[in-house]
Amino acid sequence: MDAPNTKSDPAEAALRQYPELRQMYDEFSNYRPEILPSKYWEELNRKNLRQLAESGYENFKRTLARNYFTWIVRPLNQQNRFLMREAGLWQSFKIITSALGAPRHEHLKRKHTIFYNMLTNLLWAYVEKNDSNGLLKRIEEPLEGNPPRVMRDGRLISQDLANSLIEYDAILHPQLDRREVRTILELGPGYGRTAYVFLNLQPACRYILVDIPPALYVAQRYLTAVFPDRKVFSFRSFDDFADVQQEFDAADIIFLTPNQLELMPDKSVDLFINISSLHEMRMDQIRYFFGEINRLTRHYFYFKQWKETTVPFENETIRESDYPIPTDWKQVYRQQCAVQHKFFEALYAL
C-alpha cells in the first residue's frame, strides 16, 4: 500500500503534518502481500488520514474513534433496546431525556450527539449494574483525544471505556490463570482503548500493540501521553529482532506494524487479543494471522468478531465457523457477546 502522493489530498497533508506517521507508512514496502490492508481498510484509512488532517490528533476521540468501536446508532438499535430492558423504564426515561437536552458535541451533528449520549449512558448503567469487581472505581476516561463530554455522577464516561471493561472482564475469565499473563499482544488495537484498561488494572503487564497506520500512530501518541512513566518501545523499522531485543524486553508498551510479528521469537506472548478486526480481513489474511497467533502465543487467545459479515469491496463473507481454530487449542468458552448480540467472543487455551 502506497502513501498518498497528491499534495492537495488531505491524506497527504496528514503525512506532512505528522512525520512519525509517514515513517509507519513507509514500512508498507516490507509487508507480505497477504497482510497488506484489505480494500476496505485502504478506504477507511484514507478517511482516517483526512480526519487527522482536518481535525487533528487532539480530537481523535470525536473523529477517528468512530471508525473503530464507538457507536452512533439509532434509538431502536439492538444495543439500545437490550440496554433499556436492563436499565428499566424509569432509568431509561431519564437517560433519553438527558440525551435530548444535551448540548451538541463539537465534530458531531446534533442527532449524533443525542445518539452517542443515549448509548453511552445506557452502556455505562449496564456496566455499573454488573460491576461486581468494582472496576469503575479504579479507572476513568482520559481527557487526551478530547472525548465527548458525557458526565455521570460527576465523572467523565465513554462508550470505549465501558466496552473495554466488559471485554476485560470476559478475557480474564475464572478459568484463565492471571499469574500466567505477563505479556499481552493485541492485533488491531485501534487507538489503544483496551490497552489503556489492561495497563491500568494490571499494571505489571507488558502490552504489545500491532496495527497499521494511522491507528498505530494515534495509539502510540495516546498511550505515551497517558502513561508518561512507562518505558515505551516506539515504532521503528528493523530487520533482525536481535538488534532491538534488549530495548524491546525492557519496555512496558511496544508498538509494531503487522509485518514485524514474524520477527518476534516463538512463544513470546502470554495472551493474544483481537477485537473486531479479523472479520474485516480476507481469508488469506485471517489464515496468516492465525498461523502467527499459534506460533507466538504461550497460553491464551481471545477474539471478538461479527458472527457473519461481508468484507466491503472484497465480496468475501466471513462467518463464525470460518476461523481456522487449530484442533489442539482448548476452548474455554465461545458465546454471544453481552451487549452487541451480533458479535461472538471466544477464549482458547493453547
Image (cartoon, rainbow, N blue to C red):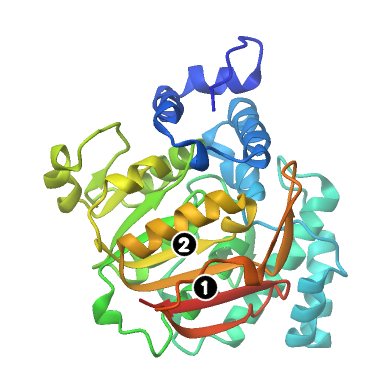
Q: Position of residue 32 (x, y in %)?
A: 44, 37
Residue 98 in the figure: left or right of residue 8 = right
Q: Do we see residue 12 in this rendering?
A: yes
Identify the residue at image location x=52%, y=37%. Answer: 36
* Residue occupied by mark 1: 167
* Residue occupied by mark 2: 194
Marks 1 and 2 sit apart, C-alpha to C-alpha, by 8 Å
Q: Secondary structure at mark 1?
A: helix
Compare marks 1 and 2 and give the one earlier in the sequence: 1
**Amino acid of disc 2:** Thr
Which residue appears farthest toward the left when viewing the image? 246
**Amino acid of disc 1:** Glu
- Neighbor class of circle 1 (other Cα within 10 Å; few <14, some 14-19, many 20+) is many
When the figure is inspected, residue 109 is found, relative to residue 129, above or below; the finding is above
Q: Secondary structure at mark 2?
A: helix
The answer to whether mark 1 and mark 2 are in CB contact below 8 A is yes
Q: Judge by depth and name the residue closer to the eye, 28 or 49.
A: 28
